[in-house]
Image: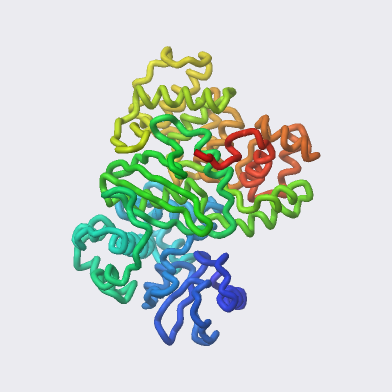
Amino acid sequence: MHTDTERCLRAVQSKDARFDGWFYTAVLTTRIYCRPSCPVVPPKPENVRFYPSAAAAQQAGFRACKRCRPDASPGSPQWDERADLVARAMRLIADGIVDREGVPGLAARLGYSTRQIERQLRAELGAGPLALARAQRAQTARLLVETTALPMAEVAFAAGFSSIRTFNETVREVFALSPTDLRQRATPGPGAAVPGTLALRLPFRRPLNPDNLFGHLAATAVPGVEEWRAGAYRRTLRLPYGHGIVALAPHPDHIDCRLALTDLRDLAGAIARCRRMLDLDADPEAVDGLLREDPQLAPLVDKAPGRRVPRTVDADEFAVRAVLGQQVSTAAARTHAGRLVRAYGERVDDPGGGLGHLFPSAAALAELDPAELAMPRTRRATLTGVIAALGSGALRLGVGSDRDEARAQLTALPGIGPWTVECIAMRGLGDPDAFTPTDLGLRRAAAALGLPRTPAALVRHSAVWRPWRAYAVQYLWATDDSHPINHLPTN
C-alpha cells in the first residue's frame, strides 16, 4: 500500500487508525516516522515519504515518533492473510527465529536460499531479515525498559542483542533517547499483578468482539493448561528458552496481557503467539465489509461486528486436540486432553492459580500407550499416527509452514478427514480462508439462514466470502446462543 501515495496521504490526513501497521509515514524535515493515526498536525505532502515497515524507515535514517509510538501499532494483517514466502518469513521473524537461528535458520525452515529470502523481503518491505529482526529487538527492549526494573545489561540480552553497546546504539538510533532516558520518560502502566510479571497492552484494530473469541478459548480450555479466572483467560506456554504463563483480559481499546516467563528472551515470541492466538492483527473493516455483501450474513455482522478467529499458541498441540475432538462433545474433548496432560505434561508452578502443566510435546506423547485412551480403536490409531508424524517431522505445522503442503500432509494420515484438516488450518495454521462445510453446527446455522444445506452446495456459495471464510464460520457459529463458545464467561 505504501506505493499508493494518494491513498496514504488521505489516511494520514484523516488520522485513520485502520491503516496503522499497513505503512509508516516518514517526515523529511524532522527525520521522524509515525503511524498514520499520529495525532500531530499532518505534514506537508512534499515532506512525506511512505515505508512498508518500521525497519525500512529506520534503515532510511528516521527515528520513531515519541508521541504515537509507531513500533507499538498492530501488525500488518497481510502476514496472516497471505501464504507466500514473504508472509511466512514475517511470521517466523515475529516468532524470533532470526534471533535464535539466524538468517540461515530462517532459510532452512522456509526451504529457500538466504539470498532469495533477502531479495524478496527487501523488494516488498524495504528491509532484509536482519533489519526486520533488529526492529523487533528494539521494540522488545523498549517494553522491558519501560515495564520492568531490570538492569539495562539484562534488558539488552533478554531483548536479543549480542552486546550492551549494540543495545545502546540501537535504542538511541530508533527512539532518539538513551535507555535510561526512555525509562525515566515512561508513563506508569497498569502495574504487575505479582512480582516477576510483565504487564503489557496488546493493541488491535477496532472493532473487536470478545464474546466468541474468549468464549471459545474458555469453553474448550484443557484443565491444568488453560483456565478462565478473574475476568482473564490464562494458559501455560511452551517457549524456546523456557516456559511461561499468560493472562489475557479484553478491554475496549486493548488486551491486557500479564506475562510470567522463566526466561525473558522469550518475550517477543510469547507476545507474537498471544497476538496470533487472539487474531489481533486482523483487519475487521475489510473482513466485515466483504461478508456484509452477502444478504444472509449481513444481519449477523451488523449485530456483532469485529469477530475474530480463536487460534492457538502451538499448532502441534492443536493438531492433537483436534483429533481428540473428533465426533465428541466439547466436554468430552476437554476430558480426553486433560488426561493426557496429567499423564505426560511437564509440571509448572502457578501460585494462586489453577494451572499446573504444559501441554505435552510430541516427544512426550510418543510414550503414550493407546490402550489407555477411552476412545474407539480407529481414533486411537489416528491420534498415535498424528503424534508419530509430528515427532518425525513428516508433519510440519509451525508458523512458517506452507499451508497447502500442511493440508496435504494431514490428508495423507489415516483417520484425518476434511473437517479435521480445515479445523487445524483455521486455528492451528491461521488460514483466514479455512472452511468446514461438514461441521454440524455450521450446517444447522446455514439452514436456519436459508443458505445451502449440503456441504457441496455450501462450498459453492462460500466463494463469495473468500478470502475470509474462517470469519464467516465464526458468524455462523454465533447463531447458537445456547453454546458457551459464544459467550464471554462471567466468572
Give the residue furthest to the right: 450
Quadrant of the image containing the N terminus: bottom right
Figure disc tally = 0
91 relative to 290 in the view: left or right: left
- x then y, percent, for residue 324: 50, 25
Q: Would you place residue 187 above or below residue 373 in this image?
A: below
Q: For the point 32% across and 68% down, which residue is it?
A: 186
Q: Would you place residue 400 above or below residue 481 in this image?
A: below
Q: Is residue 130 visible?
A: no
Q: Is residue 426 visible?
A: yes
357 relative to 6 in the view: left or right: left
Q: For the point 59% across and 28% down, which residue is it?
A: 417
Splitting the image into 4 quarters, where does residue 484 fall?
A: top right
- x then y, percent, for residue 93: 39, 55
Q: For the point 55% across and 40% down, which residue is it?
A: 215
Q: Would you place residue 301 above or below residue 50 in this image?
A: above
- x then y, percent, for residue 85: 48, 53
- x then y, percent, for residue 65: 41, 75
Q: For the point 71% across and 53% down, which residue is it?
A: 302
The structure's colour scheme is rainbow
In the image, 7 versus 105, the foreground residue is 7
